[in-house]
Amino acid sequence: MYVCCLLVLLPVLAFQHLCSFRCDRAVSPDPERSGQIETDAGRLSSCCVIQSFDGMSWLLASPEESLPFILADRGFDVWIANNRGTRWSRRHVSLDPSSRLYWNWSWDDLVVNDLPAMVDFVNTQTGQKPHYIGHSMGTLVALAAFSEGRVVDQLKSAALLTPVAYLAHITTPIGILLAKAFVGEALSDLLGVAEFDPVAPPVTNLIRAFCRRPGMNCYDLLGSITGKNYCLNSSAVDVFLKYEPQPTSTKTMVHFAQTVRDGVLTKYDYVLPERNIASYGQAEPPVYEMSGIPAGFPLFLSYGGRDSLADPADVRLLLQDLRGHDRDKLTVQYLDQFAHLDFIIGVCAKDYVYKDMIAFLNRFN
């Protein structure tokens, strides 16, 4: 029996329901491989939707080590989502990426518009409820959506690698500095930069300036941001840096910085009470309450002890919020030596993470 999987990394789909998005069937099961059941209707597949920041991130390791191929080999029909603003998801019915209005969104819009559109799309194409697999921002968007009761009835389960619901304890020096220095706000309000492109001069010049500050060590910039990864080889890092990171909106980076500074997950804060009232009907932005995630929704959470972004202390706050979750529907995996990128391009992720995760998915097919 094929199984449908949706893999999600970081921002995706429908800008005010008008933005073209990419949610591609990446790899379908080989009918000669195991994990399939013959029925009167023929072979069926379980479906997975995978999301992170940019869909390509899931495919940068070798086929033997990349999660989409591993899932397909085990009978899953895999769909990979690309976040809005990234290389494969930049079209719009009326706006051009060079305009500020095109980038006028934060990850709140991914929660309300993009994730539901993505799941609806896969449901329509396959006629199945998919499993959801997220990494990094793909987990943040999912958790925020689940806390409001969105898409949980359309999914079989969710596997969240490096789950992000709180950012109060991040240990990446440059991330803390950028948040506390209100760099996103400066880029947007003072310099008029609406697209946060990590390799464009406005951003790289700022990072170089911060790296010159006393106490800042940017020699291993990737490690300083993600934490000391356990099982990345040099070729994997080279390939990753050739294609990543991808652009997002500056407003999304401001939203992240607000979450770091405030220590709580809320909708985007417009700062001015009248603007918050216009958007939310109250002076302060509403909080995403993780305890609101339905207790019977199957969740698999995997996190690492060396992760500088999904810090173990922040994950423990999430687990405390989930203490009322049905015990047989919550699986938690802790890997002491893993950091942020080990879960997606680490050469040992297939043995330490994916094996247990696939066993979890199979429980809820």
Image: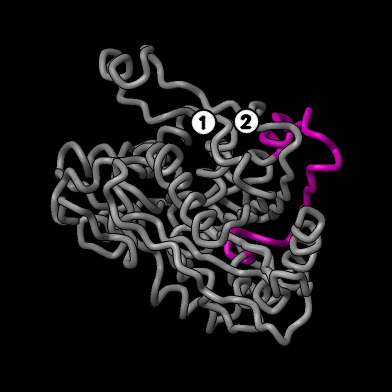
Residue 326 on the magenta segment: yes
Q: How far from the left and from the top, in percent, is residue 100?
A: 16, 46
Q: Callout 1: helix, strand or loop?
A: loop
Residue 2 falls in image quadrant:
bottom right
Question: As displayed, is residue 238 above or below residue 220?
Answer: below
Residue neighbourhood size for the residue with mark 2, other residues' Cα within 10 Å, grouped as few (<14), some (14–19), many (≥20) = many
Q: How far from the left and from the top, in percent, is residue 286?
A: 46, 21
Indicate left or right for 26 with 194 as reference: right
Q: Nearer the viewer, residue 265 or 209?
A: 265
Q: Nearer the viewer, residue 3 or 224?
A: 3
Indicate left or right for 40 with 274 as reference: right
Q: Which label number is shown at residue 347?
A: none
Question: As displayed, is residue 1 above or below residue 184?
Answer: below
Q: Which residues are magenta?
A: 316-343
Residue 217 on the magenta segment: no
Q: Nearer the viewer, residue 59 or 186?
A: 59
